[in-house]
Image (cartoon, rainbow, N blue to C red):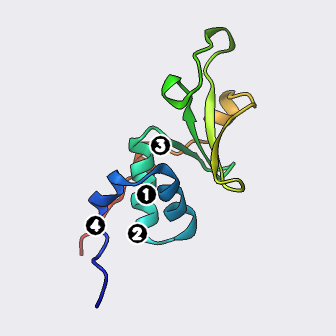
């Protein structure tokens, strides 16, 4: 008996760690693209040069707002498999490396 096929609508119910697993473990698979699209919906952004996912940190992430220090970011550490506070500077050189929403949108080619 075959397990039921995974529908892309199921991705909305997955924990972020599961989406990161799909993204990193299934390169060049259509599910990788759908996982990336779902992460973008959840306000995660992929940095093409650093090969890391980033998200603006906030109270919902357990990070208190600190207006004096500017915006804080989380990144997903693939070695420890957890979200961590990014301690570096998010200058223009770093923020310029994020893929756009259009870059991660799944497109179908009609024949």
Question: Mark 3 or mark 4, which has the lower sequence index?
Answer: 4
Q: Secondary structure at mark 3?
A: loop
The tag earlier along the polypeptide, 1 or 2, is: 2
Q: Secondary structure at mark 4?
A: loop
Nearer to us: label 3 or label 4: 4
Rendered location of residue 11, percent (x, y):
35, 57
Label 1 packing within 10 angstroms: few (<14), some (14-19), many (20+): many
Residue 7 circle label: 4
The answer to whether marks 1 and 4 mark residues whose Cβ atoms lie closer than 8 Å is no
Q: Which mark is residue 35?
A: 1
Residue 79 visible in the picture: yes
Q: Secondary structure at mark 2?
A: helix
Q: Kindly identify the residue that appears in the image at 47 percent across and 56 percent down.
A: 19
Marks 1 and 2: CB-CB under 8 Å?
A: no
Residue found 31% across the figure and 81% down from its top: 3
Depth check, front residue: 100 or 46: 46
Tag in front: 1 or 2: 1
**Residue located beneath label 3 in the image:** 100
**First in sequence: mark 4 vs mark 2:** 4
| SS at badge 1 | helix
| Above or below 35: residue 54 | above
- Give the camera-side residue of 94 and 2: 2
Question: Is residue 27 among the parts visible in the rendering?
Answer: no
Q: Is residue 23 above or below residue 12?
A: below
Give the alpha-carbon distance from disc 3 to disc 4, as whole Å.
Answer: 24 Å
Residue matched to label 2: 30
Whole-percent x, y for residue 55 in the image: 55, 36
Spatial CA distance of label 4 from label 2 is 12 Å
């Amino acid at each position: 008996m075959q397990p039921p096929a995974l529908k892309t609508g199921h991705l909305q119910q997955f924990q972020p760690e599961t989406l990161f697993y799909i993204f990193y473990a299934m390169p060049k698979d259509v599910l990788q693209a759908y996982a990336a699209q779902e992460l973008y919906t959840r306000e995660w952004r992929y940095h093409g040069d650093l090969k890391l996912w980033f998200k603006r940190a906030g109270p919902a992430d357990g990070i208190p707002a600190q207006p004096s220090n500017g915006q804080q970011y989380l990144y997903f550490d693939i070695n420890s498999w957890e979200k961590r506070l990014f301690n570096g500077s998010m200058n223009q050189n770093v923020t310029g490396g994020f893929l756009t929403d259009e870059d991660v949108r799944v497109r179908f080619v009609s024949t």
